[in-house]
Image: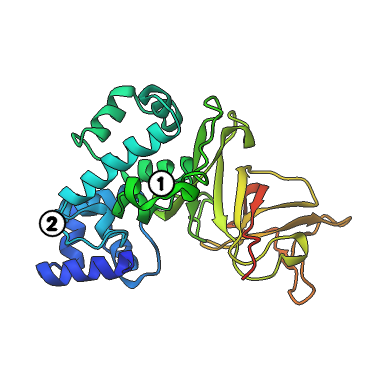
């Protein structure tokens, strides 16, 4: 399937709309739209919704998740409504129980199943996770037909209705000069069980890049979940802004002379010594969890 940047370039070319014009239509910065067009960053869901409304296209089409033409919505809505109803009933859930799982009201579930309203992309993602169904199948297939008995038995719903799901933002490897992330740098969200985290604290995520922390069990492309923190103890793995822009994951170390180093966990990489006069150095968070793909390649 096409990527978001492919679809965005296609629709702008078809409609003869410039990036500067799309910026005016959406209120998003022209530089951000240029990054989307180049494929450097993937837009987060709320930005995709803004762009899709401005261009009058289906947001799932814009994300490359469905193959229908940009103006076709009927088949999409029919599939989603039938599939939500089918999956809910196959697991013997009431509309109220499904609403509790996705933090929506019973009436919202009723509207989804009646084709009166379509779920947002955030909700589509949550539903796919809850029922262990890939988004493409949820959107494009009639699950009541394509799922045979053996497949039905593999659909695992999270039966603990009190175990809410929490969305955490995934940021691009950039931070502003004050050592804090900004909303436009959110490139995705990950959903985790609420009992993973302390509800009194704030969290954010980044994708690991490279092998500098390989001996700490952090591989390239792992999802790193950080607890926001401005101070960490020596020996703590955390997220740090070294200059005005780049955020990096390293182990924070302070020696007897009070020299500060950001230490890699790979002998092939050099420690980063922090100049005490560096006004841009900031501690952004301390590592809470590492989510790795352990499947055989």
Residue 11 in picture, x, y percent from top left:
17, 66
For residue 125, which numbered disc appears in the image? 1
Q: Is residue 91 left or right of residue 61?
A: right
Q: Which mark is residue 14?
A: none
- Decide which of 87, 101 is in the foreground and name it: 87
Q: Residue 70: x and y, percent? A: 17, 59
Q: Nearer the viewer, residue 229 or 195?
A: 195
Task: Please report the residue visible at 50 percent of the width from the left and 56 percent of the height from the top.
Answer: 175
- Mark 2 falls on what kind of element? loop
Judged from the image, the secondary structure of the residue bearing numbered disc 1 is helix
- The image quadrant where one finds the C terminus is bottom right
At horizontal 26% and vertical 49% (from top left) the residue drawn is 49
Q: Find the residue positioned furthest to the front.
A: 149
Horizontal and vertical percent position of residue 2: 31, 69
Query: Which quadrant is the N terminus positioned in?
Result: bottom left
Q: Pick the residue in front: 141 or 236.
A: 141
Colouring scheme, one of rainbow, by chain, secondary structure, one colour: rainbow
- Report if residue 44 is visible in the image: no
Check whether the beta carbons of the residues at disc 2 and disc 1 lie within 8 A of each other. Answer: no
Q: Residue at x 46, y 47 (%)?
A: 149
Q: Which mark is residue 71?
A: 2
Would residue 145 be seen by someone viewing this image from the given angle?
yes
**Looking at this rendering, what residue extends furthest in the bottom direction?**
268
Question: Where is 186 relative to 17, above or below?
Answer: above
- Answer with left or right where residue 105 lies relative to residue 257: left
From what the image shows, is residue 128 above or below residue 171?
Answer: above
Q: Is residue 283 above or below residue 18?
A: above
Q: CA distance from mark 2 to mark 1?
A: 22 Å
């Amino acid at each position: 399937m096409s990527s978001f940047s492919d679809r965005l370039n296609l629709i702008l070319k078809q409609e003869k709309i410039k990036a500067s014009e799309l910026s005016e239509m959406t209120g998003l910065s022209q530089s951000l739209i240029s990054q989307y067009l180049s494929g450097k960053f993937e837009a987060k869901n709320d930005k995709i919704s803004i762009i899709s409304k401005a261009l009058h296209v289906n947001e799932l089409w814009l994300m490359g998740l469905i193959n229908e033409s940009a103006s076709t919505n009927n088949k999409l809505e029919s599939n989603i409504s039938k599939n939500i109803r089918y999956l809910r009933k196959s697991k013997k859930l009431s509309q109220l129980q499904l609403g509790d799982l996705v933090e929506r009201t019973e009436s919202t579930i009723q509207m989804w199943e009646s084709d009166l309203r379509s779920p947002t992309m955030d909700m589509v993602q949550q539903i796919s996770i809850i029922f262990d169904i890939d988004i493409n199948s949820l959107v494009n297939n009639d699950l009541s037909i394509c799922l045979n008995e053996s497949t039905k038995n593999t659909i695992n719903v999270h039966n603990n209705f009190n175990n809410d799901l929490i969305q955490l933002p995934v940021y691009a490897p950039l931070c502003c000069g004050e050592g804090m992330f900004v909303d436009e740098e959110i490139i995705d969200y990950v959903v985790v069980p609420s009992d993973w985290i302390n509800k009194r604290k704030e969290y954010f995520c980044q994708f690991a890049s490279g092998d500098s922390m390989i001996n700490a069990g952090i591989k390239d492309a792992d999802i790193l979940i950080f607890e926001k923190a401005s101070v960490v103890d020596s020996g703590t793995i955390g997220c740090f802004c070294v200059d005005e822009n780049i955020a990096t994951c390293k182990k924070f170390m302070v020696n007897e002379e009070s020299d500060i180093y950001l230490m890699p966990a790979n002998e092939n990489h050099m420690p980063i010594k922090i100049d005490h006069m560096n006004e841009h150095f900031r501690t952004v968070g301390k590592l809470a969890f590492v989510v790795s793909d352990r499947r055989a390649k």
